[in-house]
Amino acid sequence: MKLSEELAWRGFVNQTTYPDMSALDGDPISFYFGVDPSADSMQIGNLAAAMMVRHFIDHGHHAYLLVGGATGMIGDPDGKKDERNLQTLEAIDHNKQAIAAQYKTVFAGKDFTVVDNYDWFKELNYIDFLRTVGKNVPLSQMLGREFVQSRLGTDGSGISYAEFSYSLIQGYDFVHLSRTYDVTLQLCGADQWGNSIAGVDLIRRMDNKEAHVYSTPLVVNKTTGAKFGKSEGGAIWLDPAKTSVYAFYQFWLNAGDADVIDWLKVFTVLSKEAIDDLERDTHENPQRRMAQKVLAREVTSIVHGGDRAQSAEAVSRVLFGEMNFADLLDEDIELLAHEIPVVGLGTTIVDALVSSGAASSNGEAKRLIESGAVSVSGEKVDSDHSVNLRSLIKKGKNSFILVR
């Protein structure tokens, strides 16, 4: 399948300056894709665009992956109702390193170059910037941006000169990469279209060269209508310290039938044939949720590695009664220990229920046990039971305690 065909089939088509997408099927193109270090992790909204980047790499194009050390000092105002708080230089440096490490994980085994726009902005003084960049940007163009209009409107919170100038900084990134690496294309999410077009215009004005932008749509959860990557608990992060591997796996496992096939196309590199088979299975045997299981395993493997994906799958099967606790490996137990309360060996079943919060008192714990609502690794126990082996206490259908 040609790149233009694959992008269309997977749903990666939004806006582009190319008059014909077949331009992507020709000679290798040097392109860039950037993420600002506003946090020390990407979230799954960023992952959608990153997966698009993988297809460009797989079809022979040359990738420059940018961490925005300079742009991160200001923060992209687009889509923000209020002025951002500036981050410390130490926080920005930490975040840059974390984002670069995630690039290396998501694009493992691929050929790409990581660049940091602070490397070229640190040598550019203010007067030079005004002469080389500012002189080539019409004020009417900047004032016409939607986020500027909304911030300057009657109900707007106003905008600083720093945030107003953000698009000039990002635009110059494109100029620098064009001059240094012959980059002629920027890939971005739909929300970055305006900033990216600024770079195309700047290259034309400064160097009389042609450059292009290709954007992917923002993914929307059809089941909830929310912007993708957001849940009641907040964003779904790629960093396991922010979103645990198990919670990450569960997010994908809980995909609705209306979303799962689209998400398989966007967030995995499975073939069309494999996804078509899963789509048929979803229609014919929805209760099996095979597409969701494959989605969870594949995306977790890309972000966290195959071993941790297998552990998340094993833990899920145990908690849902599809696998025996005794079959878990040590690494699976370690993952489980971050998700549920843990008590030590030799604890009485009553003490375990109370200390973990599963019961409010010894009396309630005993009543739960006597009613048959409590089991240890699948076996019913009495109130005098002492847990001396690594095991899983279950109360009701969905409450668990790990003993180790």
Image (cartoon, rainbow, N blue to C red):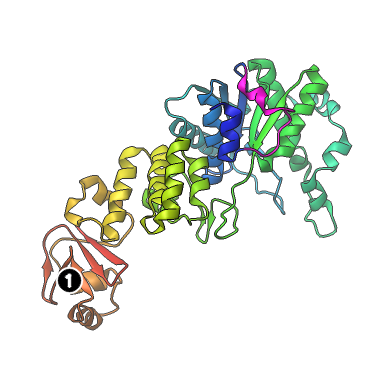
401 over 114 or under it: above or below: below
- Answer with the quarter of the image where residue 198 lies: top right
At 74% across and 36% down in the image, what residue appears?
167
Determine whether, in the image, residue 151 is placed left or right of residue 31.
Answer: right
345 over 40 or under it: above or below: below
Q: Say which quadrant the C terminus sits in.
A: bottom left
The percent position of residue 154, horizontal first and vertical second, equals 85, 58
Magenta-drawn stretch, dominant element (helix, strand or loop): loop
Q: Amino acid at mark 1?
A: Ile
Viewer-nearest residue: 28 or 113: 28
**Residue that numbered label 1 is attached to:** 349
37 over 287 or under it: above or below: above
Residue 18 colored magenta? yes
Q: How packed is label 1: few (under 14 Cα within 10 Å), some, or many (20 or more)? A: many
The magenta stretch spans which residues?
13-26
The percent position of residue 93, horizontal first and vertical second, equals 54, 35
